[in-house]
Image (cartoon, coloured by chain):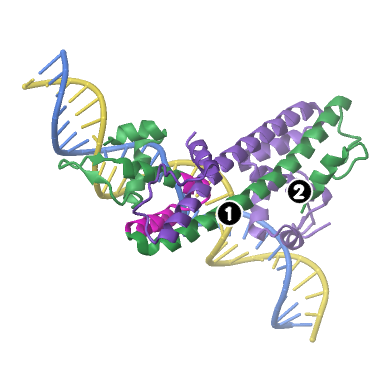
Chain colours: A purple, B green, C yellow, D blue
DNA sequence: TATTGACCTAAAGTTAGGTTTAGGTTGTAC
DNA sequence: GTACAACCTAAACCTAACTTTAGGTCAATA
């Protein structure tokens, strides 16, 4: 059993954020002491791990609540939950591809400014193409523009 | 020269968004017709490409404006701009590592629900460890928890 | 000449995900 | 018995990045 302060330190999340998650219905099983103080158990901790994971994968709070509702409904929703994680996996893979394209573009800009700094001016450089551009950078640049 | 409507279609961005970017000072060189209508040239188009790239890499509008200011100041700011792209490259690499950890966690959950769906119940599974868990998945799970 | 479509502005509204504030309770330490 | 830390609530506030609204200009077309 953990207090909200302990959980806050464990996950490096502000206490009001944990209370906000609770208010949004993200902890289905959270118990309280008679005085009203929250008691986080191992299930709540696992829930929080999943919450952080789903948030990082781009899900909204209300979607995460829906998932938590499914969990509370037991084995009948197993297939739904599986499909959700398959879908999230695909979403993350898409994000990684997008991020790779962005990185390609940034690599190109690093090359551009490397060259410009060496020359002391960008007057002799173009933003779209330069014959001195190394092949991999050129490919990246094309790639980043779809 | 392109009208705001043409640029909107080229980049698949709503017209009000382009006007908003303009108001925020992201197009330093944007010309206008005497009647006040915006004329986007090739420089504005390249600026928009950079804006999209920097946004995707996690930069805020006001930071992008600052970069655009540097561009307008000419060769004196080349080194600054180079450093900025180096920094953005590092940021993106960090994001990709984070995303990989998230993907690892999601892979683990996919395995978890695959197994649970096969058995028809999650009663015999734990959220933290299962002896049937394949090694790579177990490594991923550990990894995703730092 | 009237209508249409593409543009313009300023200002108000929206959304998600928190964060802050103000005021109150509880349980232990001196 | 009082001071303190750690908890509680409801409600107001905040921020970024748009989006919507309301009202207006302008040039070409029917």
For image coordinates 80% across by 56% down, the residue present is A33
Q: Is residue A26 visible?
A: no
Q: Are marks 1 and 2 on the same chain?
A: yes
Please, is residue B35 above or below residue C23 in the view?
above
The chain containing the residue under callout 2 comes to: B
The chain containing the residue under callout 1 comes to: B
> Was residue B8 drawn as part of the magenta stretch in this picture?
no
Mark 1 vs mark 2: which is more N-terminal?
1
Q: What secondary structure is found at the residue carrying circle 1? A: helix
Magenta residues, start to end: B53-72
For image coordinates 37% across by 55% down, the residue present is A122
Q: Viewed as shown, does residue B13 lie left or right of A36?
A: left
- Quadrant in which residue C24 is drawn: bottom right
Please, is residue B60 above or below residue D20 in the view?
below
Q: Residue furthest front?
A: A132
* Towards the viewer: A127 or C11: A127
**Rendered image: mark on residue B144:** 2
**Tag 1 residue:** B91
Q: Is residue A104 visible?
A: yes
> Was residue B59 drawn as part of the magenta stretch in this picture?
yes
Task: Sort mark 1 into few (<14), some (14-19) or many (20+) by Cα contacts within 10 Å.
Answer: some
Quadrant of the rendering where the C terminus of chain B is positioned: bottom right
Residue B103 rendering spot, x and y as whole percentages: 71, 41
Q: What secondary structure is found at the residue carrying circle 2? A: helix
Please, is residue B120 above or below residue B141 in the view?
above
For image coordinates 61% across by 41% down, the residue present is A58
* Towards the viewer: A143 or A40: A143
Tell me whether circle 1 and circle 2 mark residues in contact (CB < 8 Å).
no
Quadrant of the rendering where the N terminus of chain B is positioned: top left
- Quadrant in which residue B132 is drawn: top right
**Label total for image:** 2
């Amino acid at each position: 059993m953990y207090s909200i302060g302990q959980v806050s330190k464990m996950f490096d999340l502000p206490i009001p954020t944990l209370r906000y998650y609770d208010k949004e219905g993200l902890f289905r099983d959270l118990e309280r002491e008679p005085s009203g103080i929250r008691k986080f158990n191992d299930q709540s901790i696992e829930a929080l791990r999943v919450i952080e994971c789903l948030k990082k994968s781009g899900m909204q709070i209300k979607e995460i609540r829906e998932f938590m509702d499914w969990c509370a409904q037991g084995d009948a929703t197993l297939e739904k939950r599986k499909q959700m994680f398959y879908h999230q996996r695909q979403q993350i893979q898409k994000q990684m591809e997008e991020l790779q394209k962005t990185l390609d573009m940034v690599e190109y800009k690093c090359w551009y400014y490397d060259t410009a700094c060496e020359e002391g001016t960008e007057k002799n450089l173009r933003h779209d193409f330069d014959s001195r551009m190394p092949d991999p950078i050129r490919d990246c640049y094309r790639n980043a523009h779809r």
